[in-house]
Amino acid sequence: ENSSILTVDSNGKITGVSEGVAAIHAKVDGVKSNSIDFEVRSSNLRRGTFVKAGGYEASGSTNLEFNSGKLTLKLESNFSTSFALGTYIYLANSTNASAVRSAGLEISQISANGAHTFDVLAINNAVKLNTYKYVVILCKPATVTFGFAELK
């Protein structure tokens, strides 16, 4: 329904043209099926939405983007979390606090809600866009996960 976002060829192959959301439906003999929405995203961007953990609060959006040779982690303006002494942001492949501390990449200590931007390659230049699965909010001194976002 929006060929500026995606196209469908005569064999049913869907091709993304630009970022956005577009609906696809079938039409045979004038009868139209229900539509299905498809989201087209850049392959250089992974997004996530925070969920709370362990009875602590966490919400908002995050993204990890590779652009012009930079890998940037962003916490969006709607980001909000519980705070304690030593609240940190990590990239990790687990949401378990002990595993995050031992095998995750510590990004930065944070002390305020809202938008934050971090240069991941300045911390570790070997990290790739798909190296880590989660952005984790961790109370480092207590080794407690406050929340996490799965990057998709």
Image (cartoon, rainbow, N blue to C red):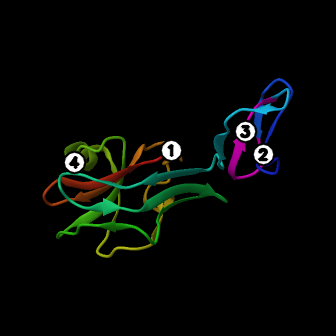
Mark 1 in CB contact with mark 3 (< 8 angstroms): no
Residue nearer the viewer, 131 or 8: 8
- Report the amino acid beneath label 2: Glu
Asked whether residue 102 is drawn in magenta, I would say: no
Comes first in the chain, label 4 or label 2: 2
- Residue that carries the numbered disc 4 in the rendered image: 97
- Label 1 to label 3, Cα distance in Å? 22 Å
Q: At 47% from the left edge and 42% from the top edge, which residue is drawn?
A: 131
Q: CA distance from mark 4 to mark 2?
A: 45 Å
* Residue at mark 2: 1
Asked whether 119 or 13 is in front, the reply is 13
Q: Which residues are magenta?
A: 16-27
Q: Quadrant of residue 28?
A: top right
Q: Is residue 120 visible?
A: no
Whichever of labels 1 and 2 marks the residue nearer the N terminus, that label is 2
Q: Earlier in the sequence, mark 3 or mark 2?
A: 2
